[in-house]
Each structure stands twice: as structure tokens, then as C-alpha cells.
Image (cartoon, grey):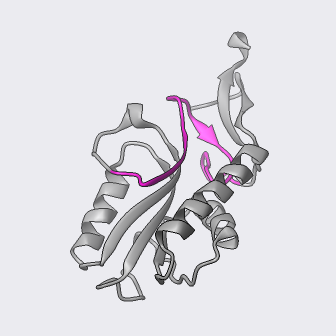
Amino acid sequence: MPDKDYQLKVLISREEIKNTVAKLANEIEEDYRGKHPLLICVLKGSFVFMADLIRQLDLPSSGKVKVVQRPKTPVKGRDVLVIEDIVDTGLTLSFLLNYLRRKKPASLKVCALTDKPSRRKAPVSIEYLGFTLPNKFVVGYGLDLNQKFRNLPDICAFEDNESS
């Protein structure tokens, strides 16, 4: 866990994030044209990404679901898009996708801002991906360390001061 011997280094700038969110929104709009997708946000960290993504989308969409709650909007027969800030081990996302598949959606896809494939323990497919990350601890843009750093506009990695 990072401590006082570490400093934050910008890994992905707010401008890169903004451009990538716009690119992802364009891809999603193209694929969901004429459809009314149900967007499911994996809380807590994904709320920043989802808020920015929704503002970029020109689609009728609805629904936000906490992982710990049953969906309040019916999933059966809907096109479902799960919004995730980071896919790390894949365990949480795999669990959620299996749960949602049992609800029989018309389609089920994942949009993730970031991915750390080197840490994967459960296989998951990501149809819309912003960035692939190195195996570093990251914070910012909704990602946190003990509920801190979520408010940073950039995605930052903890770097050892001696390697700087």
C-alpha cells in the first residue's frame, strides 16, 4: 500500500480521458442506434466515468444499479451495458455478468475505462475499452485508495520517490 515514500504521477491526463470517453460514446451510439439500452454502473468508482459517458451519449438510456442491490429496472429482454471504471482481477465483473445473464437480457456488453489484464483471475470480455494499464496502483477519476483521491481529474499511479 502506498505511503509517504511515494508520490503521484499522472498516468492518463484529464484531456486523454475526455477524448477517450467521447470515442467510447461514439462507438456505443453506433452499436446501440435505435435501441434503448439499460446502463448499469458498478459503484462506487465508476460513477465519475458513467456520468461523463452519459453526457456524451445521444441515446435514450436508463438505470443505475449497485452491485449489492437487485436491479430495480427489469433486465429481461433489454440490451444491457455494464459500465466499469477498472477491470482488475475480473472477479467482481464476472460475478455481476453471470448474475445478469440469469436475468435473460437481449444482449450484455461491458464498457470499461481501464483494464489491467496482467492481474486477471476470471476471464471477462470488454467490448468497449478506454485504456490498458500497467500493473500499478492507480487513483483518480473515481478510483480510490481508502476512499481518497477519487476527486483527482487525472488517473495517477503511485511512484516510488527513489525511482523518479
Most foreground residue, 127 or 31: 31
The spot of residue 158 in percent (x, y) is 65, 30
Which quadrant holds residue 104? bottom left
122 left or right of 74? left
Most foreground residue, 41 or 30: 30
The spot of residue 45 in percent (x, y) is 58, 58
The spot of residue 157 in percent (x, y) is 65, 33
Residue 149 visible in the displayed image: no
Q: Give the farthest residue toward the top.
A: 162
Residue 84 visible in the displayed image: yes
Whether residue 141 appears in magenta in the rendering, the answer is yes
In this rendering, is residue 93 above or below 154? below
Q: Residue at x 41, y 36 (%)?
A: 117
The spot of residue 119 in percent (x, y) is 39, 34
In this rendering, is residue 64 above or below 13? below
Q: Residue at x 74, y 14 (%)?
A: 164
User: For the stretch drawn in magenta, what is the main secondary structure?
Assistant: loop
- The magenta segment is 125-150
Q: Residue at x 55, y 63 (%)?
A: 44
